[in-house]
Image: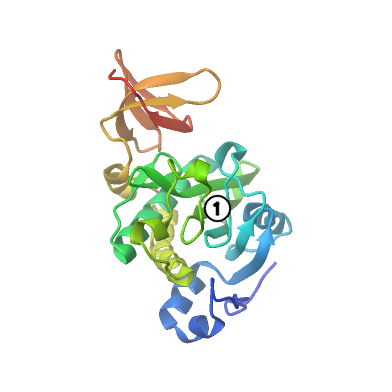
Amino acid sequence: MKFSPVDYAFIRSNEFYSEYEVRTNPKVQFGIAIICRVIRYYKELESTQIVVKELAKKGFDEGIVVIAEKQTGGYGCGKKKWVSNVGGLWFSMLLKPVVHPNEISKLTLLLGITLGRVFKKRYGINSEIKWPNDILVLEKKIAGIITEMSVKDGETSWVAAGIGVNINNELPEYLKNISISLRDVLRRKTHILGFVSAFFDEFRYLYFDFKKSGFEGFLEEYNDKIAYKNRNIIVDNGYHDVITGINLGIDGSGRLIVKTKNKLEKTMSRTVKLAENKI
């Protein structure tokens, strides 16, 4: 299903977008138009990921973005619930990179680099990437990433890439010891449009480079930003397969390298946390 590069459906909301700002800001138009040709906005959704996957199955081309002010069933890796209240940024993109399915996990890593660049360049905030899909500030989660894909005849059909960023949203009390918002860090509210435009302005370059040359050129930057580097960690895949050792970063395949007492382990397990005791 095709659509025009100028077929925008922008948001009219003080908290999110002003249509006037988008229409009259060339940088915003250019950065967004390169990656996303349609933006669908909802006041409330169960999940932007669910909507993007439905659109993908209907044959929509790459370039549609779904944003919600609030999600009632937002989720991350392993279907873990993501609290998505008003004031945060919750969106998913439909992407169709012509790369082998084995390379799609690296798209998650690329999105982590993108978010890290936005936090640093636009807000002067140092962040870290908690492999493979969380962004930390002050060792608390400020953003998360999820990528889901469809494969047909051994080739990638489409990717639904979802991102959640705590911007101005109020965090529940039970999450405040492990999560943080941009408002908490800056001690002021910030305009969500600014974050969105900065994200797409950054991602368009990284995404095209990734499609052309793969992830190898981003490996050093990722390892410079990885959380818990050279610290003792516990990696758990949820099936009683636990690795404890020193975090040495990732290899060119996107696997986490852990130095245990006896050897180097390379893993794609998803849950990483700091170990309380020395190895």
Q: Amino acid at mark 1?
A: Ala
In this picture the colour scheme is rainbow
How many other residues sit within 10 Å of disc 1, few (<14), some (14-19) or many (≥20)? Answer: many
Which of these two is toward me, 105 or 183? Answer: 183
The single residue placed furthest to the right in the displayed view is 58
The single residue placed furthest to the front in the displayed view is 173
Q: Position of residue 48 (x, y in %)?
A: 63, 56
Count of marks, rendered view: 1
Quadrant (top left/top right/bottom left/bottom right) for the C terminus: top left
Residue at position x 45%, y 76% in the image:
28
Residue at position x 31%, y 30% in the image:
247
Q: Position of residue 33 (x, y in %)?
A: 51, 74
Q: Is residue 202 above or below residue 145?
A: below
Q: Position of residue 224 (x, y in %)?
A: 26, 44
Q: Position of residue 267 (x, y in %)?
A: 43, 27
Quadrant (top left/top right/bottom left/bottom right) for the N terminus: bottom right
Q: Is residue 77 left or right of residue 71?
A: left
Q: Which residue is mark 1?
A: 161
Q: Is residue 107 left or right of residue 233?
A: right
Secondary element under disc 1, as helix, strand or loop, is strand
Res 206 quadrant in image: bottom left
The single residue placed furthest to the top in the displayed view is 262
